[in-house]
Image (tube, rainbow, N blue to C red):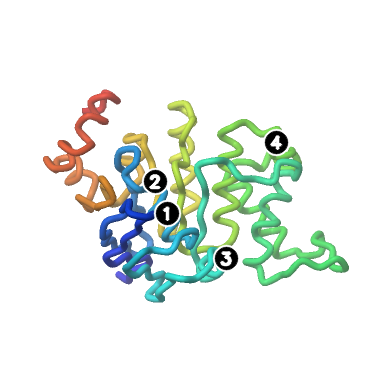
Amino acid sequence: MSIALELSNVKKSFGKTEIIRGVNLAVQKGERVAVIGPNGAGKSTLFNLISGRFEPTSGSIKLSGTDIVGKRPYEISRMGLARSFQITNIFSRLSVFENLRCAALYASGQKYSFWKPLSKLTELNDRTEALMASLELKRRRDVAASLLTYSEQRALEVGLTIAGGGDVILLDEPTAGMSHSETDRFVHLIRTVTEGKTLLTVEHDMGVVFGLADRIAVLVYGEVIAFDTPERVRADRTVQEAYLGAVLAAEGTQ
């Protein structure tokens, strides 16, 4: 199986403070990987490095075999990587359909044009309708995004991430702030809309992590101390001592 995303000895310092301390990570095409670790471990910094918001101090990051270090976020996005953020980022005054259609516009090969009505772009509109249905938002089609429930807004943001046509998807704490019932439903939704794509997600909910990920990367103080299947990570004594044991005990899942 080919590698979709590969980090080799990636380091990141801010002044004299070293945040990422030589991360090596190879994510296979079509694989779902969860990145877990305590607060301050460097998870968000790692996502910022991969998506081009930060440039590593040293090391390489390859997307489908091409080094993306030094490229701007929009350039990396056009190469097939899409990212969501911890804070919901949607067009609040536009409807659900309009939000998704805007996100899908570039991926469809179209550009903004004042003289070409979007309503005439049949393929684009059909693709938007299909994505909206997969997000279970069809009944909210013409509702302004600001009027959606919190979980619906998070679903819409995942849809905006997917709509760009990227093959590698980064989701940053997608279930944060949701109830247990909302979380269970949302995990199913993520599985559905990322089918066939490569997924890298930061997540604190261990139920989500063990229910969604094919492999788990444990990041502690800027270093990956384990990268393996959920079963092996759960049983890893080093991981338990550094992070996982206390979290699972607190959640009552151990």
Residue highlighted by disc 4: 146
Q: Position of residue 25 (x, y in %)?
A: 28, 61
Distance of label 4 from label 1 (alpha carbons): 27 Å
Looking at the image, tell me whether mark 4 or mark 3 is earlier in sequence order: 3
User: In 3D space, how far apart are the residues under numbered discs 2 and 1 (Cα atoms)?
Assistant: 9 Å
Give the Cα distance between marks 4 and 2. Answer: 25 Å
Q: Nearer the viewer, mark 4 or mark 1?
A: 1
* Residue bearing mark 1: 47
* Mark with earlier residue (3, 1): 1
The quarter of the rendered structure image containing the N terminus is bottom left
Residue type pointed to by label 3:
Tyr
User: Dot 3 lies on which element?
Assistant: helix
Q: Which residue is mark 3?
A: 74
Location of residue 78 (image quadrant): bottom right
* Disc 2 versus disc 1: nearer the observer: 1
Residue at mark 2? 202
- Which tag, 4 or 1, sits closer to the chain's start? 1
Q: Quadrant of residue 9?
A: bottom left
Q: Which amino acid type corresponds to the residue marked 4 in the rendered image?
A: Ser
